[in-house]
Amino acid sequence: MRGLTVPALCVGFFAASIGLAHLRPFGNPRNITEQQRIALTGDAQMRDAAKRVLIEKCADCHSDATRWPFYSNIAPVSWLIEHDVVEGREHLNLSRWQELSPDRQQVLSQEIVQQVKRGTMPPLPYRLIHWRARLISADVSALTTLAPDEAIETAPAAPGDPVRGRAVFERRCTGCHALDANREGPHLRGVYGRTAGSVPDFDYSSAIKKSGLVWNDANLERWLRGTDAMVPDSNMGFSVPKAQERADVIAFLKTMH
């Protein structure tokens, strides 16, 4: 390396970084057009304020219309950004919103509201770099209209059906939970009869850890009526308004030993 000046080394490093950025270990997510940006969420039945926030604050990772800043063309930063975009689109692609079933739209809407209320979306590392993605209180208020509170049925339901409960679970719960793996929430196989906050490898809120709850019929019913009402600061924020659906989900979870 003798004879090379510091400026020459810097130029060489910068050129190598730009060249390496063309290597895409996570695939190539840079397939966007201005027409796709205009069409984000299509004719989705959502309030204009909520749609505006989704487009301005969420679309870069959660649509086909990502805006790529200059540093996204420099490796290894480019690889990290492309990885986040690929994962974001797989979970929620606003450009494909109208292709989703109404049930899936409802589940994702609830998840969006839950995440923004908890302050976990956009993630902190992303906000530190992308200041324009920060959500102010007006943005959070606009997004909460995606999943307005529904009246909770309190009348007793018929006995739960585990077959119907599996369908409700897959439709309403799998955005955050799985039976055998931790996601946003802990795994749910064996949850019936389990003490709340007891899965050893999951980071629970302190409120859940201190609750002392055991997940039996009565406590699961109360929990599914409204997690925030039962355990404030639980970091969940979810409800199943229909009494029969709650009974069916509980019946299903009881069979998952």
Image (tube, grey):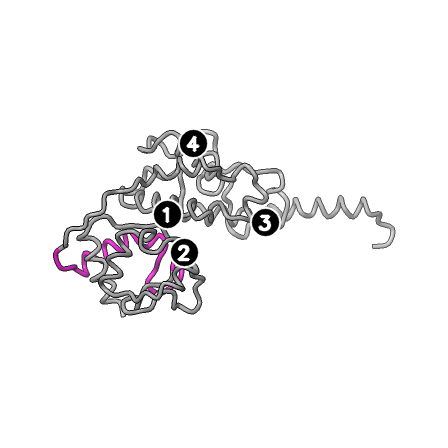
Tell me the CA gap for discs 4 and 1: 18 Å
Query: In the image, which disc is placed on residue 101?
Result: none
Would you say residue 56 sits in the magenta stretch? Answer: no
Residue at 33% from the left image edge and 30% from the top image edge:
43
The quarter holding residue 93 reads top left
Neighbours of disc 3 within 10 Å: few (<14), some (14-19), many (20+): some
The quarter holding residue 197 reads bottom left
Q: Amino acid at mark 1?
A: Glu
Q: Position of residue 214 (x, y in %)?
A: 30, 67
Q: Earlier in the sequence, mark 3 or mark 2?
A: 3
Neighbours of disc 2 within 10 Å: few (<14), some (14-19), many (20+): some
Q: Position of residue 94 (x, y in %)?
A: 40, 39
Tell me the CA gap for discs 3 and 2: 31 Å
According to the picture, the residue beneath numbered tag 2 turns out to be 184
Q: Amino acid at mark 4?
A: Arg
Tell me the CA gap for discs 4 and 3: 33 Å
Q: Earlier in the sequence, mark 1 or mark 3?
A: 3
Q: Position of residue 216 (x, y in %)?
A: 25, 65
According to the picture, the residue beneath numbered tag 3 turns out to be 23
Which secondary structure, mark 1? helix
Q: Nearer the viewer, mark 4 or mark 3?
A: 4
Residue 40 lies left or right of residue 3; in this view the side is: left
Tell me the CA gap for discs 1 and 3: 33 Å
Q: Main secondary structure of the magenta part?
A: loop
According to the picture, the residue beneath numbered tag 4 turns out to be 52
Which secondary structure, mark 4? helix
Which secondary structure, mark 3? loop
Tell me the CA gap for discs 2 and 4: 26 Å
